[in-house]
Image: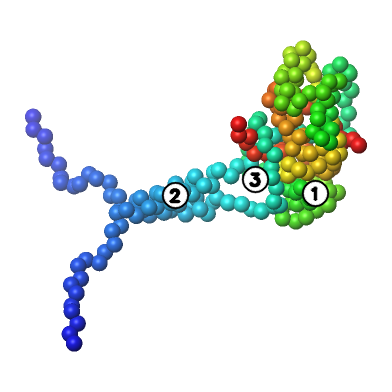
């Protein structure tokens, strides 16, 4: 039994597309690694034992109860309306400090929603009060 | 005026070493990028619109809070009262420290407020509530 001889013609792998493949990998890694950035709402907490006397007319209490309802000053407000109301109040008094107080059982989600609304209204003076029962 | 003929050297740049250069770049990026250091706790982050990016990953310290009320820092569970010690050391080592609070949207404000107080005691005052971008 005779084996057929195969003729071998040039056994090299083309390497001209190597650069393209490497480029593709490079771009893949570049894109996938920059996506995961830390994002969020920034805030600066008051230092321990720091107490500043502020006149009452410059303070606006923003109370959040355990079911996510918000009391702004004396009137109940919908969370999505806070932005508008705060804007008006800031126009009237630019020194206004908004003090956010929440109930112990308030959901974090509601708190973040309120904080986001305050940020949207460009309120820079936000104070976080301790939770109350 | 006649120009003199120049030597017949080819003026093309050799592209043979291109793959090597690109592989070098690739390996550099693969080595220097950190995909994820700590896995943390499973949390559903709340959504917000006015989001700011944290400046540097090196100056960020994460605290995970799950909906069950577990508090985790670098994959270890801690009690709320222990946060001040850990954060005090971190803050002493890096004055530019920003604490990123990755809390579940269903966690309660009692715990979050407790963490606020601990961070104030540790003098780590720059806080960032990790949120997702609201899509609407």
**Residue A126: quadrant of the picture:** top right
Label 2: element kind: helix
Q: CA distance from mark 2 to mark 1?
A: 41 Å
The numbered dot on residue B58 is 3
How far from the left and from the top, in percent, is residue B97? Answer: 71, 41
Quadrant in the picture for the N terminus of chain B: top left
The numbered dot on residue A26 is 2
- Which tag is nearer the camera, tag 3 or tag 2? 2
Residue drawn 64% across the image and 53% down it: B37
Marked residue nearer the N-terminal end (3 or 1): 3
Q: Which residue is mark 1?
A: B69
| A53, above or below B5, in the image | above
Are the residues under marks 3 and 2 on the same chain?
no
In the rendered structure, the answer to whether residue A18 lies left or right of residue B60 reads left
Specify whether residue A44 is in view: yes
In the rendered structure, the answer to whether residue B2 lies left or right of residue A132 reads left
Q: Chain of mark 2?
A: A
Q: Please name whichever residue, A35 or A52, is drawn nearer the observer in this view of the structure.
A: A35
Label 1: element kind: loop
How far from the left and from the top, in percent, is residue A7? Answer: 18, 72
- Which tag is nearer the camera, tag 3 or tag 1? 1
The numbered dot on residue A51 is none
């Amino acid at each position: 039994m005779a084996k057929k001889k195969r003729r071998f013609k040039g056994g090299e792998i083309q390497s001209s597309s190597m650069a393209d493949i490497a480029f593709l990998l490079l771009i893949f890694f570049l894109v996938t690694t920059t996506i995961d950035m830390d994002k969020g709402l920034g805030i600066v907490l008051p230092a321990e034992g720091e107490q500043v006397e502020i006149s009452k007319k410059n303070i606006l209490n923003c109370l959040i109860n355990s079911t996510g309802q918000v009391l702004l000053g004396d009137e109940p407000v919908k969370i999505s309306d806070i932005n508008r109301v705060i804007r008006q109040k800031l126009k009237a008094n630019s020194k206004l400090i908004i003090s956010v107080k929440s109930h112990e059982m308030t959901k974090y989600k509601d708190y973040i929603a309120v904080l986001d609304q305050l940020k949207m209204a460009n309120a820079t003076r936000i104070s976080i009060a301790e939770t109350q029962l | 005026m006649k120009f003199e003929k120049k030597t017949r050297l080819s003026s093309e740049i050799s592209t043979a070493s291109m793959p090597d250069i690109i592989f070098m770049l690739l390996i550099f990026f693969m080595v220097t990028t950190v995909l994820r250091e700590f896995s943390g706790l499973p949390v559903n982050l709340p959504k917000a619109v006015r989001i700011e990016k944290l400046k540097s990953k090196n100056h960020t310290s994460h605290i995970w809070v799950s909906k069950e009320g577990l508090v985790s820092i670098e994959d270890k569970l801690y009690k709320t009262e222990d946060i001040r010690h850990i954060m005090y050391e971190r803050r002493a080592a890096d004055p530019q420290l920003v604490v990123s609070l990755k809390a579940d949207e269903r966690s309660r404000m009692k715990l979050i407020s407790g963490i606020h107080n601990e961070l104030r005691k540790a003098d780590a005052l720059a806080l960032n509530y990790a949120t997702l971008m609201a899509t609407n």
